[in-house]
Amino acid sequence: MSETASWTGLALGAAGGLGAGLVIALAALFGVWWERKVSARIQMRFGPQQAGPFGLLQTLSDTVKLVLKEDILPARADRGPFLRAPLLVFVPIATSLLAVPLVTGWAPLDSSVGALFFLAVPSVSVIGILVGGWSSGNTYATLGGLRGASQMIAYEVPRSLSVLSVVVLAGSMRPVVMMGEWRWWWIPLLAVAFVVYLISSIAEMNRGPFDMPEAESELVAGYFADYSGIRWAIFMMSEYGSIVAASLFGAAVFLGGTHGLPGVWGLLVLIVEAILIITIIMWVKWTFPRFRSDQLMSLAWKVLTPMALLQLVVVGVVTAWL
Amino acid sequence: MNLVAYSLVALVTLAGAAVVLSARETMRLVIGLGAFLLGMAGLYLYHGMALLAASQVFLYVGGVLVLFIFAIMALRRDPDGRARIAVRFDLGAAAVCAGLFVLLVVCLAPLAPFAGPGSGFTLEQSGALLLGDYLVQFEIVGVLLLVALVAALSMTGGGEDR
């Protein structure tokens, strides 16, 4: 896909969007099952076992249940925004997935500012969260939306700074080049940036231990408390979509992605690395207790941002010395 | 195709602006503003300014607009629970807007017509311009923002001794 307008570009864009949506749907099917298995192991249980081999069909039957459930519209909700908010959250995340290089030397959306695109576009989904929480006409949901927004804005700063280290080292914002320039010694050099990226990505997707916005014990479910059925499922899919996007991008630029392997082999290596990161993200969620709101903010501004800046200085010195 | 793409983006931008002007409900107004800002990013992209477009989405849609929504959520609400805008027909404001519009049209007319998509700047060119020829202007804008920040802090009486 090029950056100028053409009919083929439009068709490719539509196909890319459809593909990203399908990838996220499949990833959510697998991700929910994988999360249940991981959390079950952590709590010394077995997780889903009954539906299909290893309980693999459990999420499929859940999906059927979700699609058939009644789509409730609360009496005090603002109809238009309320019904469209789930898509406003989902679409930016699916779009950002297109900037991730999947095969050596190829990304669905190969842009010269791809890294910035990947960081910028998901931030649009904050608006969906705020609108969804607000238009429910419910205090819990509004509070959840507010918390989510303040958290996502705060953690965008360290997240962007950590990716900036890779951009400086690779000398390009094109994710394909960033992946191609990768060398093994980037792992020890960028360890701090990777940790900052991982933590701020978890916070950015509102997942535990940073799930203040949906804290079920105090806000019931936060910004999607009033949603049910298919619209709730879209919120859920967006969460897994952002896990997949952050993990794939992290694997591509921090862990070397395809390692220069051609075609499908490179893609397989990338997917294995991404599943590793996804497993770490789930492990973290089921191990650590939830952060308090003020702890969340001080972690972002007083710990992660200085760490990312320090990493940037180190990378700058190393780049000049190279 | 260029015409179709341009018209589509322009339509989104204008529709967003129309919603901002006509919406009675603040949250719909903000969604219109979001469509307008995204449309502007599309226009930048059409003229080949990919970096500018991505920054527009990052800073304005993802940042500034969310701050707007914060402010709106802190507004006083109606008994039915939603913040609304009182519509006033202010002739003075309308005159200022019309004057500004005419001024912009007069100033920008020599640049028309926007025939096709531009090639824009590459990332390297943008960086070289911002940190080379336009370094002083770039830094002055930064200082201006810092001054605005300090002014806002001192006006609201923030800080330790509040």
Image (tube, rainbow, N blue to C red):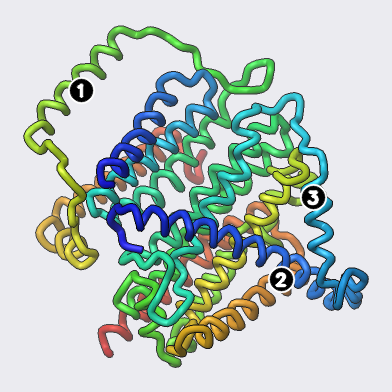
Q: Which residue is mark 3?
A: A66
Residue at the far left: name it: B110
Q: Is disc 2 placed on a helix, strand or loop?
A: helix
Q: Say whether marks 2 and 3 touch (CB < 8 Å).
A: no
- Residue contact at pointers 3 and 1, CB within 8 angstroms: no
Above or below: residue A278 compared with residue A256: above
Q: Quadrant of residue B93?
A: top left
| First along the sequence among labels 2 and 3 | 3
Mark 1: amino acid: Leu
In the rendering, which numbered label is found on residue B100? 1
Local packing at callout 3 (Cα closer than 10 Å; few below 14, some 14-19, many 20+) is some
Q: Residue furthest bottom?
A: A184
Camera-nearest label, 3 or 1: 3
Residue drawn at x 40%, y 85% is A182
The residue tagged 2 is: A282
Whether tag 1 and tag 2 are in contact, CB under 8 A, the answer is no
**Cα–Cα span, label 1 and label 2:** 54 Å
Q: Is residue A171 left or right of residue B139?
A: right
Which quadrant is home to the C terminus of chain A?
Answer: bottom left
Chain to which the residue tagged by mark 2 belongs? A
Which chain hosts label 1? B
Could you tell me how many numbered marks the image carries? 3
